[in-house]
Image: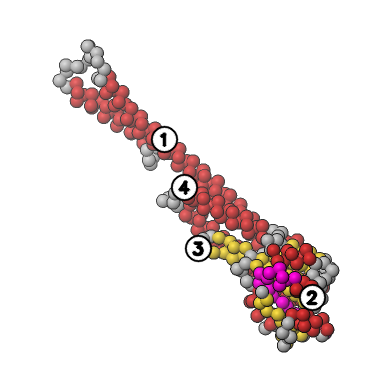
Amino acid sequence: MIVDCALYRHGRRVPAPADVPAVLAQARVDEDTFCWIGLFEPSREEFDDLTRGLGLHPLAAEDAVTAHQRPKLEVYDAALFLVLKPVLYDDSTDTITVSEINTFVGDSFVVTVRHGEANPLGRVRARLEGQPEVLAHGPTAVVYAVCDAVVDNYLDVADDFHTDLEELEAEVFQPSGRDPGRSAGRIYDFKRQALEFRRVTGPLADPIARLAGSALPFVNERARPFFRDVGDHLMRVNEHLETIDRLLSDILAAHLARVGVQQNDDMRKISAYAAMAAAPTVIGSIYGMNFDHMPELHWTLGYPAVLLVMASVVLSLYVFFRRRGWLGSGGR
């Protein structure tokens, strides 16, 4: 559906006709005028009507309706087609939700097609309408403002993601941490979210570089420095995400090593207790045999002496294993 259809002249919003074709016609006739049409998850029929009026390429129109595109920039005869992927981060579930904004930029129009929950467009439009001197630069100003808002949000999400990662690191390595399997699962979840984030930010570097460095139709040449600034911010995001990914790998490796050491300690404890249990078993089994001639069999102190020997052996083994560090603190 159409969320907003606005007409701007010299950077200020002016009254517009009721129907979209009339708005497009007026934008093309009047000097220093353009229109900005915003749509949210339009149907194919709704977008086909708009496509015919703007002369958009059918492949780009199909991409805009179906969504699920990688960030990219394509040049067609009637318009540029730019795909952006804004994100939302839920601190409570450590989940990144990816949306999509498809932008068409022509000589006198901007069309934004939004899919998903993330919606920076309302704030961008409100901010630009409060800055007519910026909006006077035409459709290029809209493209820059949308790119800037999306990438700045990447920075905020990356910071929030890193903060939660530090909390996870402290939680995983605290002495009385949670179940090792659950911790490993949460680390893997973080890695999966980081990978999803990198799939969004990484491919966007090329479109932003093209907007900042090469002559493109429908893009004001004076806007290059602004797109270079967006590119610098995007580079910071990608470097930050690379650091996060390395940190996650290090945390996972250290956690698995810690689990391995803990399992080794557990096995040593089990072995030590098994050895202590085996000693009296061996001694007791001798007296369970049915021999006619057994030593100390008729000795009055034989039974308590055997029990004393058993206790002495077990105690000696306990002291030995504890000094070796198999049964707790101390030892090697």
Front disc: 4 or 1: 4
Image quarter of residue 70: bottom right
Q: Are dots 3 and 4 in contact, CB under 8 Å?
A: no
Q: Secondary structure at mark 1?
A: helix
**Residue 90, image x and y in percent?**
54, 64
Query: Observer-nearest residue: 75 or 325?
Result: 75
| CA neighbours of label 2 inside 10 A, class few (<14), some (14 to 19), many (20+) | some
Which mark identifies residue 180?
4
Q: Which mark is residue 29?
A: none
| Callout 2 amino acid | Gly
Q: Nearer the viewer, mark 3 or mark 4?
A: 3
The circle on residue 92 is 3
Q: Is residue 6 left or right of residue 300?
A: right
Look at the numbered discs 1 and 3 and tell me whether their residues touch, using CB distance below 8 Å: no
Q: Is residue 250 above or below residue 84?
A: above
Q: Nearer the viewer, mark 2 or mark 3?
A: 2
Where is residue 152 shown, x and y percent of the image? Answer: 65, 69
Span highlighted in magenta in the image = 31-48
Residue 223 in percent (x, y) is at 78, 73
